[in-house]
């Protein structure tokens, strides 16, 4: 036996034993180190960025889910949340846990909304309502009242395409008197818009629509001894193209309307034709705006139009076709979802072919402003200017100014309150035979969501029309009903 070889072998054994102990100690320390690192190092999560006003949102990276601040709408177990989806891992000062160890669920604004019906690449959201109502009407010293059922069908159809978008909205209302006497007021409205996302910040819009209503008995052109006023049908077509040239924004659009009037049923049972009121109207509009900032865009706008009646002359021999010219300036405002809209101020004139009618001109004010002072509260202000051609001999018509205010407030997650006010000023030329009118409407309503598919509604409204010459009209309505949504 060689002594040197024995000593070498014993040293190798000791070194091997020491190496084994070192590896075992390292293995015991690694889990503790990894746990400490997980508790102190936050995962990289990209918060979502939202662009308000345009109604679009850029979501977070697909590999890291977006995180939103939770609100009290329910609770789920914290064990169901992975570190990547638990925003508390982003905080050095952890939130105080709940007593039962549960975590509040993230608020979802679509939680209480009916899911709709999926039709290919479209989503249909229909609803049907039925209400029982009562109306009290006072025309001067004459008082009438009626009870009636009102059936409403509404719906929206929206595409879900990667580019372009098609939106169709529709509404139809039928009334059926069950007591008393009074004129039923059916109405319907359908609108469709196709947005085409073209090249280089260029967007095209194609529009089509149809409306039906029965002429209001309080309208100055209504027939006084009618049992049922004329049915008014309006057909609409439109096209526009919009393009951004850096800070300059331009748009050009053309609109075509056709309005037809049905026969009037008189109290003696005969029908009176008013087809001489049927007309076609075309309008060309151009706008140029300058972007001072993304939130403030002043603009100027001009339009020219022509209205042609089916009959060259009405029964009294007046040629009521006319041309219209308008110019206005205004500003577009976009401060996000809290405040956005536009307002334009200008001048508009109507030149009638019959010189005996003269010209009708006046100030033009158009715009709408949406304001949300707090979550769950929405306020709408709107103003518009319209021409109401007259059928009175020698009168061209009136310029109508309409102001509207609608306030919607979510009192609870399942209870929404509404308050509406509107004012219509109907102004005739100083030498007109017809008198100026002022109509004020106010109303309030509540909607209680029994569940996401069924809601209970209640409404009350009051309307008052005063005239420079003639009787005052007062109308009060109350109603309660159910709305079924899908």
Image: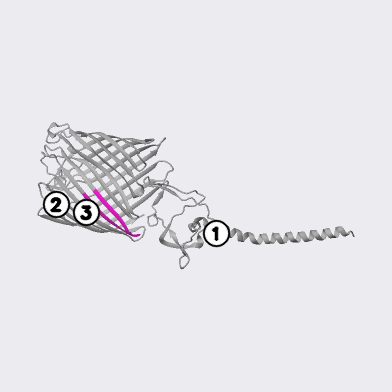
- Foreground of the two, 162 or 358: 358
The circle on residue 39 is 1
Q: Nearer the viewer, mark 2 or mark 1?
A: 1
Residue density around tag 2, few if under 14, some if 14–19, many if 20 or more, within 10 Å: some
Q: Nearer the viewer, mark 1 or mark 3?
A: 1
Write down the residue under mark 3. 442
Q: Which residues are magenta?
A: 404-422
Distance CA(mark 2)–CA(mark 1): 73 Å
The circle on residue 225 is none
Residue 402 lies, with reference to residue 319, above or below; the image says: below
Distance CA(mark 3)–CA(mark 2): 14 Å
Q: Upstream in the sequence, badge 2 or badge 1?
A: 1
Predominant secondary structure, magenta span: strand
- Residue under the point 36% across and 51% down: 125
Q: Which percent across, then down, holds residue 421?
A: 23, 52
Q: Secondary structure at mark 2?
A: strand
């Amino acid at each position: 036996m060689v002594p040197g070889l024995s000593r070498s072998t014993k040293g190798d054994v000791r070194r091997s034993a020491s190496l084994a102990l070192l590896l075992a100690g390292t293995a015991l320390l690694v889990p503790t180190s990894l746990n400490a690192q997980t508790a102190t190092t936050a995962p990289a999560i990209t918060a979502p960025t939202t662009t308000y006003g345009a109604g679009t949102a850029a979501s977070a990276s697909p590999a890291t889910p977006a995180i939103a601040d939770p609100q009290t709408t329910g609770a789920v177990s914290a064990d169901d949340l992975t570190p990547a989806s638990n925003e508390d891992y982003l905080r050095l000062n952890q939130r105080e846990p709940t007593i039962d160890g549960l975590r509040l669920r993230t608020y979802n604004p679509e939680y209480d909304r009916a899911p709709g019906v999926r039709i290919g690449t479209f989503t249909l959201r229909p609803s049907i309502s039925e209400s029982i109502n009562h109306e009290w009407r006072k025309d001067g010293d004459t008082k009438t009242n009626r009870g009636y059922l009102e059936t409403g069908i509404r719906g929206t159809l929206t595409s879900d395409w990667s580019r372009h978008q098609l939106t169709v909205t529709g509404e139809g209302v039928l009334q059926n008197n069950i007591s008393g006497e009074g004129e039923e007021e059916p109405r319907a409205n359908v609108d469709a818009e196709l947005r085409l996302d073209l090249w280089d910040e260029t967007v095209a819009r194609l529009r089509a629509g149809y409306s039906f209503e029965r002429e209001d008995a309080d309208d100055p052109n209504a027939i006084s001894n009618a049992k049922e006023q004329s049915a008014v049908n309006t057909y609409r077509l439109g096209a526009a193209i919009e393009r951004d040239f850096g800070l300059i924004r331009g748009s050009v659009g053309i609109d075509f309307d056709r309005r037809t009037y049905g026969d009037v049923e008189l109290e003696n049972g005969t029908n009176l034709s008013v087809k001489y009121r049927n007309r076609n109207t075309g309008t060309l509009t151009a706008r140029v705006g300058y972007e001072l900032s993304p939130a403030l865009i002043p603009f100027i706008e001009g339009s020219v139009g022509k209205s042609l009646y089916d009959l060259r002359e009405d029964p009294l021999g007046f040629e009521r076709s006319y041309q219209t010219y308008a110019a206005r300036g205004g500003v577009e405002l976009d401060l996000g979802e809290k405040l956005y809209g536009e307002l334009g101020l200008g001048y508009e004139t109507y030149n009638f072919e019959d010189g005996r009618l003269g010209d009708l001109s006046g100030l033009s004010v158009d715009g709408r402003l949406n304001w949300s002072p707090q979550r769950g509260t929405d306020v709408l202000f709107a103003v518009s200017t319209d021409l109401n051609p007259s059928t009175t001999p020698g009168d061209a018509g009136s310029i109508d100014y309409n102001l509207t205010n609608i306030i919607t407030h979510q009192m609870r997650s399942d209870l929404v309150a509404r308050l509406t006010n509107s004012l219509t000023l109907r102004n005739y030329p100083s030498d007109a035979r017809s008198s100026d009118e002022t109509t004020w409407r106010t109303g309030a309503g509540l909607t209680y969501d029994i569940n996401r598919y069924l809601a209970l509604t209640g409404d009350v409204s009051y309307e008052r029309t005063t005239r420079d010459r003639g009787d005052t009209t007062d109308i009060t309505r109350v109603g309660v009903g159910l709305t079924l949504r899908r």
